[in-house]
Amino acid sequence: MSTPSKISPTTLAKLAKLGIHHRADLLLHLPLRYEDETHLTPIADAQPGMTVQVQGVITHSEVMFRPRRSLVCRLMEGHEELTLRFLNFYPSQQKQLAVGKQIRAIGEVRMGYFGLEMVHPKCRAADDDTPLQQSLTPIYPTTAGLAQPVLRKLINNALESIPLTDTLPAPLLKKLKLADFGDSLRLLHNPEADVSATELEAHNHAAWRRIKFDELLAQQLSMRVHHRERSKRIAPALPPHQKFTTALLKKLPFKLTGAQQKVWQEIAHDLSQAHPMQRLLLGDVGSGKTIVAALAALQAIENGYQVAFMAPTEILAEQHYLKLSEWLVPLGITPVWLSGSLKKKEKTAAAERIATGDTLLAIGTHALFQASVEFNKLGLVIVDEQHKFGVQQRLELRNKGKENVGRVSTRQDSVGLKPDLQTTSEPHQLMMSATPIPRTLAMSYYADLDVSVIDELPPGRTPIVTKLVSDARRDEVFERVRAACLAGRQAYWVCPLIEESDAMEVELQNAIETHQQLTEALPELNVGLAHGRLPPAEKAAVMAAFKAGELHLLVATTVIEVGVDVPNASLMVIDHAERMGLAQLHQLRGRVGRGAAESMCVLLFMQPLSELARERLKVIYENTDGFVIAQQDLQLRGPGELLGARQSGVAMLRFADLTEDEDLLEQARLSADELLRDAPEVARAHLHRWMANKHDFLQV
C-alpha cells in the first residue's frame, strides 16, 4: 500500500484482509452503521430496542459469577438507573467503572433480569463539560486486531490528502439528479448530527445513491468494454449453407415456435461473423433449447468445423447425446461420446476421433476440456447449464479451438517494421441455461454477453398443478401414486439424499430407503431406482426402462433435474421439498407436463418449516413462470448463489443491491453506452477510480 511509512507491516497485512491495498481503497471502505454520540438521552427516556448514549455516575460495580462470570455495574442519573453488563472485561475496565466514576455509555437498551440494561456498551469517562461529538461516529467493517479508531484515522487522512474530483460531467449529474462524488464520500464517512442514521444504514440517502450509481456504472463500463473487445478478436465465419439445417427441420415431427425461430436467426447471424459469438440462450424448462443448439451445431458442421457440446452431469450430457444422435445420424453425422466414466480404451478411441477430425460433433462432460483431448478444427462450443461451470473451465474449452490464421506485419514507424504478430482464431460460444436469469442479473453480471430468450413454450405442454402436502399425509401420497400408475401413467419420486449423512437429521428420507418403502407399499407397481452413485451402465438401463414404460415409478435423486424427457410421466413427488432451492424445484417440476395428460407436482414437506423454506414453497406453489420464480429467488438469496460458479472471475457488487436499485442499474447501463460513444476519456477516468489495481469485473 502506498501509505505513509509509519503504518506498520502488521497493520498493512490486516488492511489487506479487508481488500485495502492502496490509499484510494480507504475512500471506498464505507461504514456498516453509525453510533450517535452527538446528543445524550436521559435514562428515563431510554426504551428497549433503542441504541442511545447516556451519562451518569457508577453507583455499584461487582464481579458476579452466576450464571457466568460477568462485571455488573449500575449507572445512576438522578433517580433513574441502568444496568451495564460485561461478559468479557479487563482490570482496566473495572477501574474505569469503579463506584463514583462519571461515564458516558452508548449501546442498545434491552430488558434484563434487573430491569433495563446494556450489554457490552462502549464507555468513556465524561463530566458535564465534556463536549459531544459533532458528527455521527462511523463503524467500519474490520478484522481482528484492527481497531475502529485506527481505521477512522487512516480513512480521514485519505479523505484529506486524495483529490476527490468528480469523474462524471456536471450535465450527466444534473440529468440523473446525483450528488457530487466528494461531498457524498465525506458525508458517508463523517455525517453531520442532523443526518438520519437510519436513512444512511438503509442505504437510501442521496450520498449512497451516488456511490451505488458509480459502482454500477463501473461494472457496466467494464462489461461493455469486454463486449467491444470481443469484436476485435478473430473467429471462423460460419455462414449458413442450410443443407443439414433444412434437412433436419423437414424431418422433425414438430415445427419451431416463433420464439425458437427468432433466437435461431440471432445465433445464425452471429455464427456468420468473423468475430467470436458469446451468446447466452435462456429458456424455461421444456422451451426447446436443444433443437436450437442442434441447428447451431449443424451450421458449424456445414462449414467443416467441429462442435463441442458440454453438459455438467453425465446424465444430462448423455440425454443430449441420445437426442442429437436421433436427429443427426440420419443426416450422416455421428457424434462421439466422451465422459469421465468411460474405460481408458474407449476414452482413447473417442479422443483420437476428435483429434483427427473423424467426428465433427463431440458431446460429453468436463472430460472434453482435459489436457489429453485435442480438437482438429473446433469452431463452436455449446455449454448447457453454463452457470454450473466455472469461468476457467469454459476458458479451457474455448482455448482448445484457438488456431493460427496467419501473420500480420504492421509498420511501427519510419525506422523499421514492427515484428510479425501471430494472430489466432477462437471458436464461437453458445451458452444455455434452463434456469431463467432475472432481468437485473442479466443486465449486470451478463452484460458482456448477447442474450437470447425463448419466451414461449411449444404447443401441447399441459399446465402442471402444484400441491403442498405435509409429510404426515405420506400414505395419501402413496395412494395417489398408485392410482396414477394403474391408470396408465408414470411417476417420479425425488429424494434429496442417497444415504444417511451426519449433516442431516436422521429422519430425512433417502432414495434407497424410500425405494424400499414404495416397493413394499405398492407391490403391483414396477419401481426403479436412479442416483448419482449407480454405475453409468446401470443408471442408463434404469432410465431407458422408465422411458420405455417398463417401470411405473422411478425413485431418484436430483440426477433427473434436467435432461429427462418422458411424456407419459404425469406425476412427480418431491420429498423434503423444503430442503431444495427454487431453481431446483422449478427444474424438477418441469420433468412432468410433457404430454397431453393433466400433470401434478406434489411438494412433500416436513414440519416445522423455517421462514425461508416457507417463502420458497409459497413462491413455487403460486408461480409457474420461471422468470418470475428467478426474480423471487434473487430477492430471497441475492445474486451470489444464482451466479453459481460464474463468480470465479466476477467481482460481486459491494454497495448496490440488484433487487432494490434496478432504476440505478438502468441509468448506469444507458450512461455507459453514452460515455463510451461520446466521452471515452470520462469512461477511462471512471474505470480507473473504481478498478485501478483491481481485477476486472470479468477476466475472460
Image (tube, rainbow, N blue to C red):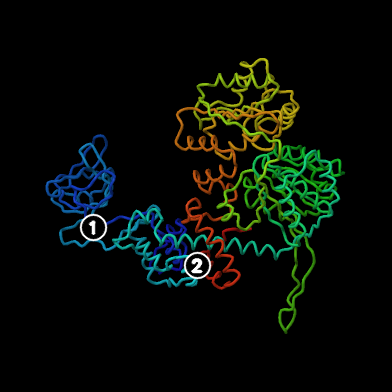
The residue positioned 50% from the left and 61% from the top of the image is 215
Residue 682 disc label: none
**Residue type beneath disc 1:** His
Q: Quarter holding the C terminus?
A: bottom right
Query: How many other residues sit within 10 Å of disc 1, few (<14), some (14-19) or many (≥20)?
Result: some
Mark 1 in CB contact with mark 2 (< 8 angstroms): no
Give how far across and how far down residue 59 sits, in percent.
Answer: 14, 46
Q: Is residue 44 above or below residue 569?
A: below
- What residue lies at 23% left-to-right and 52% top-to-bottom? 105
Q: Which residue carries the number 1 mark?
A: 39
Nearer the observer, 620 or 18: 620
Residue at left 66%, top 15%? 523
Q: Is residue 451 left or right of residue 157?
A: right
User: Going by the picture, which residue comes out furthest to the bottom?
Assistant: 414
Could you give the CA–CA distance between mark 1 and mark 2, rounded to whole angstroms? 37 Å
Q: Is 649 situated left or right of 183 in this image?
A: right
Q: Secondary structure at mark 2?
A: helix
Residue under label 2: 689
Q: Nearer the viewer, mark 1 or mark 2?
A: 1
Please, what is the three-letter code of the amino acid marked with disc 2?
A: Arg
Q: Give the crowd class for mark 2: few <14, some 14-19, many >=20 residues within 10 Å.
A: some
Residue 282 image offset from top left, x and y in percent? 65, 47
**Sequence-wise first label, 1 or 2:** 1
**Res 208 quadrant in image:** bottom left
Q: Residue at x 42, y 66 (%)?
A: 179
Secondary-structure class at tag 1: loop
Percent x, y for residue 314?
70, 38
Q: Position of residue 63 (x, y in %)?
A: 21, 41
The total number of labels drawn is 2
